[in-house]
Amino acid sequence: MIRRAVRWPEVVAPMLATAVGISAAISPGATTGVITVLAEADLLSTEAWIMGGSGDPIPSAGGMAALMHRYVDPATPFFAGQPQFPVDATHSLFTPEGLYPLTGIKVLELDPSVTQGLTILDSTIKGQIAAGNNLVVVGVSQSSVISALQMRDLLALPLGEQPTADQLSFVLLGNESNPNGGLLSRFGDPSLPPLSIPSLGITFSGAEPADTPWATAIYTAEYDGFADFPRYPINLLSDINALLGIAFVHTSYGSLTAEQLAATVELPVTDDYTGATRYFMIPTENLPLLVPLRAIPVLGDPLADLLQPALRVLVNLGYGSIDEGWDHGPANVSTPFALFPTDINPADVFTALVNGAQQGVQDFIHDLESLSLPTIVNEIANGNATDSLPSLLDIVNTFSGVLSSAYSGLLPTADVINALLTSLPAYDISLFIQELMSGDLLDAIGLPIAATVGLGSLAGMVEIGAVLQAISPLLGIGEPADLLPLF
């Protein structure tokens, strides 16, 4: 049974202040870190405070408007039952949003970045409530993790000191702390040994609390590897698809179309659920695994459409499903990774693969029939388009940048190797001992293997990101920080 959170009422402020000019500048107070996007503002009763994701410490006005329009206060709901959070003002909230090494070499690691962000958010919430304002906190990616930890801290306060349901709400996107699917909860569930990677500054902090009194809407895009990680990571195909989803899906929340949002599905929760959180899954049309193939001119899309129907079945098995790329368990329950799905009939898998192969052939033929000579010429021309030749100064500057980036790229490589040789084996041994002591020999052997496949794939993605940052000047593919926009 799906429980729907009750809409919290809008509370009118006891008095309105006269309009005051507010310039868009970072507050000098390190504990507030507030930036406003309004030229003028009144003392208002309900305000949205929007944080960015990794690599995006100060959300832009355009980015905030895109999130407000789609997820916070849409003029018209994009799907039946979509929660709306009317606000009177919108502000950006500065948080560090470091994610070494994916957002740069000389940036904060995840743990200290989240800790600092938590201090800023906590100060903002308490300060705004004390001023008589209600808040809608909007978190994206890393700032969703900050929001999850903030919920834990608020719930730990005496009941009389906690914000009421009228005073506080949350809208979270691409949440790594999703109870069922978030990367930090898949491997950080309390039933598992604690997992941290000191060399990269990452602690798998577990799931956000589900039974909170504050109206919360959590949106996840299918195959988003940070927020929708496979439950059965021994499926390497599913892992790679999810990790590519970090680059191609996790970055898309602010640009999803009305048609894509209209397909949103509300996920079920347990029958006895009493919290105020609702969980939404946004289906993804194309597998991230095939995005590189689709980039090939002319034949890329037809070949991808040929492979996708059957390949999707194999990818979805990593989630314990044939049809969807998410786990079908209750969305409010912290769900750790496991070895194999136990409720799938092999005959159903075979049938789905056969049907997928047939569908792929039909899609391939349809794509070829729709190709025309002008389309082919245009795609080839676009694919072969080149910029003007670089000057000697450009070449020298690029070579200098390559040497600097290559040198700095050695540090994250060493840290990744450290994680693979120390943190991962220690975690595997802890898993083996825990499952062996519980009498489950299969999981004692299988879970460490599954963890190695899943976390090893993640480490590989981090290493690839570090290498791309090092060689990007040589390849002329942009600044290193632009390669993996994880927000």
Image (cartoon, rainbow, N blue to C red):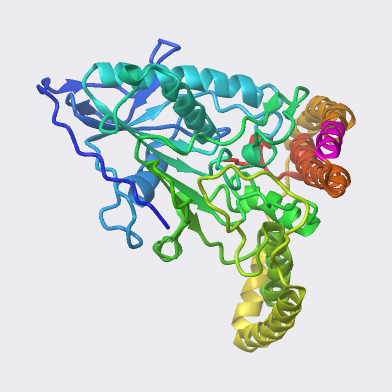
Q: Residue lying farthest front?
A: 439
Residue 275 or 170: which is nearer the viewer? 275
Residue 198: x %, y % from top left: 76, 22
Q: Which residue is drawn at 47% across and 56% down?
A: 268
Residue 196 or 88: which is nearer the viewer? 196
Magenta span dominant secondary structure: helix
Residue 371 or 98: which is nearer the viewer? 98
272 w.r.t. 256: above or below: above
Q: In this view, does 365 lie to the left or right of 156?
A: right
Q: In which quarter of the image is residue 178?
A: top right
Residue 324: x %, y % from top left: 60, 65
Q: Which residue is drawn at 49% across and 34% down?
A: 209
Q: Residue at x 27, y 21 (%)?
A: 129
The residue range painted magenta reads 429-438
269 w.r.t. 265: above or below: above
Q: Is residue 359 left or right of residue 414?
A: left
Q: In which quarter of the image is residue 99?
A: top right
Residue 144: x %, y % from top left: 50, 35
Residue 427 or 93: which is nearer the viewer? 427
Q: Which residue is drawn at 56% across and 28% down?
A: 97
